[in-house]
Amino acid sequence: MCSMQRNSEPQTSRKLAAVLAADVVGFSRMIAADEAAPVCALHSLLAEVFRPIFANNNGDIVKSMGDGWLVEFASSVAAVNAAMQIQDRLKEDPTISLHVGVHIGDVTRNEHDLYEDGINVAAGLEAITPEGGVMISDAVYSGLGGTLSPSFEAAGAQNLKNIARPVTTWVRARNGLIGHADASEHEITSNLPVLNIRPTANSDPRAELQDTADALTANLATYFGSISWLQTSISSSESAMGYSLRPTLRARGDRLRLETRLQDPGGDIIWTHKSDSRLDDVFDWQDNVVADIADHGLGMIFEAETTKLMATPDEKLTAEQCMLMGIMTWRDFSGEPFVRSAEFHDRAITAKPDLEDA
């Protein structure tokens, strides 16, 4: 006697999850021009870059569409970390560029796919993301910590395909320097202070440590680049003008040490920072150490600029310097300094009407 078994339906589960949707820009066009090269390049990136980054952030590729993926994460921070790391790695790639969208919401999953609005919103964001950028929903942005949120600027409410309500969005530009998307050490011409961030030095050959060094550089650039009164670039040029931030990552076994020096435009060291961690704690440590360096480094630059501008006669201040004086003047948020601050900003606008921050 034999027993009959019914074919079981795919197991499904419903939960809150962060979803990353990624798609290759112009892949069909690349295939039409040269079928083999883009496919090989994409397979290499998937094996060497995408999958390791997803895995390091505890992401699970739920669906692959050949030139796009849906990836599930347990948290907004993990999904955004992965999105930023991938786009940072692709900045110099000559063949492959991505759109990436991230949303957190309810999803239903079986062994083959994800469903519900959590997926539709992520896919809708991906579809309108600037090439090489990352677009996230307000639900994701509100879950980010102080280190990641400065990487994004408000992009307004967007109407997404198959979504009934507008979605408030935030976007990170291709190079991660919000407000300075086209800045380089050769293009900075205003009288605002300049900060050149040196690529994080690292002599350890392990791939995970080079990834950490690259991520530290990118995160420092996005954090400092969100400051309206500071022009930021990543530069390895020793002749670049302005302040210089020089991070060095050292490792012995699983022990890590990040040493950072801040130099003024004359080359004098005005601040140093040292932080230790272990390799298995690198992600939490990375967020904390970047926030610490940025907070203290900005304070040191601000104090140095205050000293310099206080010694400059008012009539010789440029529009940008007037704006910076306005920021500096209203530091105790009381009445008289506010009036003085408004006067400086008014002078800045009169001198340069298109100075948006003023």
Image: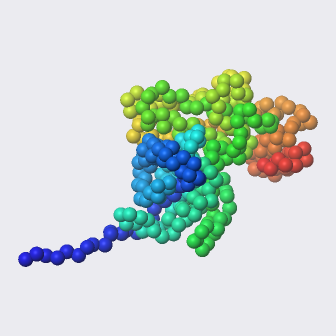
Residue 262 placement (x, y as % from top left): 63, 29
Q: Is residue 76 visible?
A: no
Quarter of the image holding residue 60? bottom left
Colouring scheme applied when the structure was drawn: rainbow
Among the 4 quarters of the image, the one containing residue 187? top right
Residue at left offset 61%, top offset 67%: 160
Say left or right for 178 vs 67. Answer: right
Rendering coords of residue 266 (x, y %): 72, 23
Query: How many labels sit on residues?
Result: 0
Q: Is residue 145 above or below residue 290?
A: below
The residue drawn where x is 63% and y is 46% is 174
Residue at 67% x, 58% y: name it: 155
Q: Position of residue 304 (x, y in %)?
A: 73, 32
Q: In the displayed structure, does residue 95 sit left or right of residue 179? A: left
Q: Foreground residue, 327 or 87? A: 87
The N terminus sits in image quarter:
bottom left
Residue 90 x, y percent position in the rendering: 55, 43
Residue drawn at the location 54% of the way across and 58% of the way down? 102
> 203 or 63: nearer the eye?
63
Between 185 and 34, the one lying in front of the other is: 34
